[in-house]
Amino acid sequence: FDISNFELGTFFSVYGVIAIFAYLFGGPLADRFPPHGLMTVALLSTALGGLFFTTIPDIQGMFYVYGFWGLTTIFLFWASLMRTTRLIGGEHSQGLSFGLLDGGRGAVAAIIGLIAVGMLSYFLPEDVESADIAQRTAAFQKVILFFCCLVFLTSLLVFFVLRRLSGVEGVAIDSLTWSEIKGVMSLPAVWLQALIILCAYSGYRVADDISLMAKDVLDYDEVQAAGIGTLSLWLRPVAAIIAGILADRISTSKMVLWSFTLMLLGGLAIAFGPVEQHDTLMVFIGIIATSLGVFAMRGLYFAIMQEGRIPVLYTGTAVGIASIIGYLPDIYMAPLMGILLDSYPGLTGHRYVFMLLMGFAGLGLLTTWIFRRMMSPKNG
């Protein structure tokens, strides 16, 4: 695509800006309508955007497709997914339900990642660095088409499986008034959850730096670096499912505290550890700790709704409100990381990125402590 780290970051920012409005309107919509129709249309539209992506668009086209994906992956999809997961979990298995969701997503992502890396390696010359732009383009187009087909098939699966839920009580409500939406907005738990998500998701976006760090700091080629990033993804199902099971036993908020602590330690290892080129030990310690903390959080930060006593009927609305703030990192993290990495090439830039991670982990710890104090039975 011949783009800089900053330009790539701005594409994600466009996605994030569109997503903010999609969260706002998509949450109440998820409370009003059954999920199978909303999520199927969302997935089909996302696959169509992928077909446009195979044309290797210019910068203007990239802005369009990322903005389009911001709409398709959020407006009809996100709150419906979260609401369905909460309904499946019931009153006593929220941690397990959300842990299995994100663990399953992580396992699928890791498998797909391995396939994609294998495809990229197969269609490129054995000496990856010798590939010209035409060879790189052709190989990447095949990977994109693979993802398009996968998303299309998933849309069919979602339609037929989730259609069985359409008649279950609580899947949809007959009407949703503005006063009810304002009532959800007045809940302190929603805003504390929003800040917890923001801190956790900022850490998740830092995890995007793992493959690039492997290339810049450990001097791996593109395929090897992608493999390191995929290896990190294999920790996602383990962390999310175990964290979910433990959350149902010892409380979700307590597991959130432990997850932010792991994020903080992982950032510390890379930001201030003795990391040198080809010295992989401290890098891998940082990667493992960060990945475990970040991916555990992915399975926890919506499971916390039950502990926050947010009404099930208004789950979609609460998810939409919390996500507006919680997913702001989609707007600022990628450009910020791009500026740091472009301004401070090599190890220094990556250290600064993981210092950011530490800051958000610390804020997340403080917010979760406040949440636990406010939601304790003696304050309820």
Image (cartoon, rainbow, N blue to C red):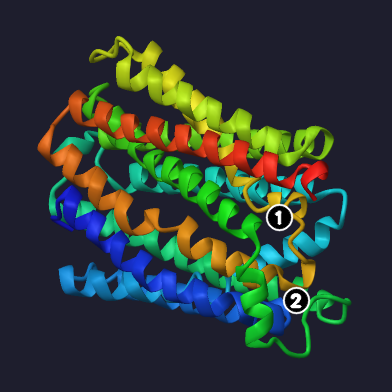
Q: Is residue 6 visible?
A: yes
Of 76 and 321, the residue lying toward us: 321
Left or right, residue 106 beside residue 286 = right
| Amino acid of disc 1 | Met
Q: Which residue is mark 2?
A: 160
Distance of mark 2 from mark 1, alpha carbons? 28 Å
Q: Nearer the viewer, residue 266 or 190?
A: 190
Percent of width and height locating residue 179 = 66, 84
To which residue does mark 1 refer? Answer: 305
Residue at 56%, 35% (x, y): give it: 234
Give residue 297's position: percent from left, percent from top: 59, 41
Query: Circle 1 sits in a helix, a strand or a loop, which is it?
Result: helix
The reply, left or right, for residue 149 in relation to residue 92 is left
Q: Is residue 156 visible?
A: no
- 10 Å crowding of disc 2: few (<14), some (14-19), many (20+): few
Image location (x, y in percent) of residue 29 = 62, 82
Question: Residue lying farthest front?
Answer: 379
Horizontally, residue 58 falls left or right of residue 62, namely left
Residue type for callout 2: Phe
Which quadrant would residue 347 be assigned to in this image? Answer: top left
Left or right for 17, reference 257 = left
Q: Is residue 277 above or below residue 258?
A: above
Q: Are marks 2 and 1 in contact (CB under 8 Å)?
A: no
Q: Earlier in the sequence, mark 2 or mark 1?
A: 2
Q: Quadrant of the N terminus?
A: bottom left
Residue at 50%, 32% in the rendered image: 291
Residue at point 54%, 26% (across, down): 261
Q: Position of residue 300 (x, y in %)?
A: 66, 45
Task: For label 1, count other residues whose C-alpha is less than 10 Å away and answer few (under 14), some (14-19) or many (20+).
Answer: many
Looking at the image, residue 281 lies above or below residue 311: above
- Along the line of sight, the residue nearer the viewer: 70 or 315: 315
